[in-house]
Image (tube, rainbow, N blue to C red):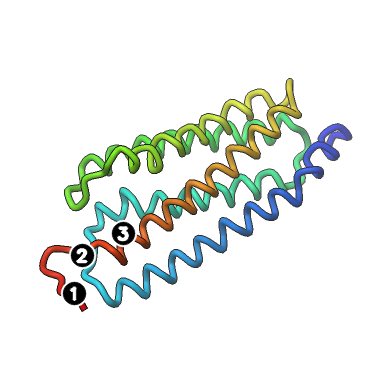
Amino acid sequence: MSQTCIPLLSAWQSFYVMVGSAAAAVIAIQFVVITLIANLRRSVPSETLSAFATPTVVQLGSALLVSAIMSAPWPSLCSVGIVLALFGLAGLVYKATVIRRARRQTYYQPEREDWMWYALLPGIAYVTIAIAALLLWTYPCPALFATAAGALALLLIGLHNAWDTVIHIVVVRLPGEAEE
């Protein structure tokens, strides 16, 4: 690893350990809660899950992946920049897929807030990471802060969406479901 790369990335290690650990914990908790609730409720169509629940896990997994990328022993900032740029672009492609899935499913009509949290904000986080990656070797300090902001945004968006999903499953009664 180049001598300039070591101090820049090592200064962020504890931040990425916290973000990655939190993302992994929320993924695990979401799996447990949805599994427990699924035993009590009627199932949701798979196209709706792939439009809302799966993207939440992907956002949290993305925060975990950025944390792993930023914690790896890279030989240069250029190398990590290339990987992060590819990651950001892949995230944008995935967001386009999520938008298409959300529009096609018929189980739930997304509201404006849903579009913001499930499409717009994650897309901004992926763009932020991709742009920061491209600037990493010319403006490393601002680019590292922007990358951290993108990773933290993915974690917080995923946390909001996981909570939103669980609350929807618990609170919203489906037609034909009896009150207990």
Q: In the image as oriented, which residue stretches furthest toward the left?
A: 176
**Mark 3 to mark 1: distance in Å?**
15 Å
Sequence order check, earlier mark of 2 and 3: 3
User: Is the N terminus in the top left, top right, bottom left or bottom right quadrant?
Assistant: top right
Q: Earlier in the sequence, mark 3 or mark 1?
A: 3
Residue drawn where x is 58% and y is 38% of the image: 150
Q: Is residue 132 placed above or below 179 in the rendered structure? A: above
Amino acid at the residue labelled 2: Arg
The tag on residue 168 is 3
Residue 8 lies in what quarter of the image? top right
Q: Position of residue 127 (x, y in %)?
A: 52, 30
Q: Secondary structure at mark 3?
A: helix
Q: What residue is pinned by disc 1?
A: 179
Q: Of residues 159 and 102, which is closer to you in this image?
A: 159
* Image location of residue 152, percent across then percent down: 59, 44
- Left or right? Give the position of 137 relative to 102: right
Say which amino acid is labelled 3.
Answer: His
Q: Residue at x 58, y 33 (%)?
A: 129
Marks 2/3: CA–CA distance: 9 Å
Answer whether labels 1 and 2 touch (C-beta < 8 Å).
yes
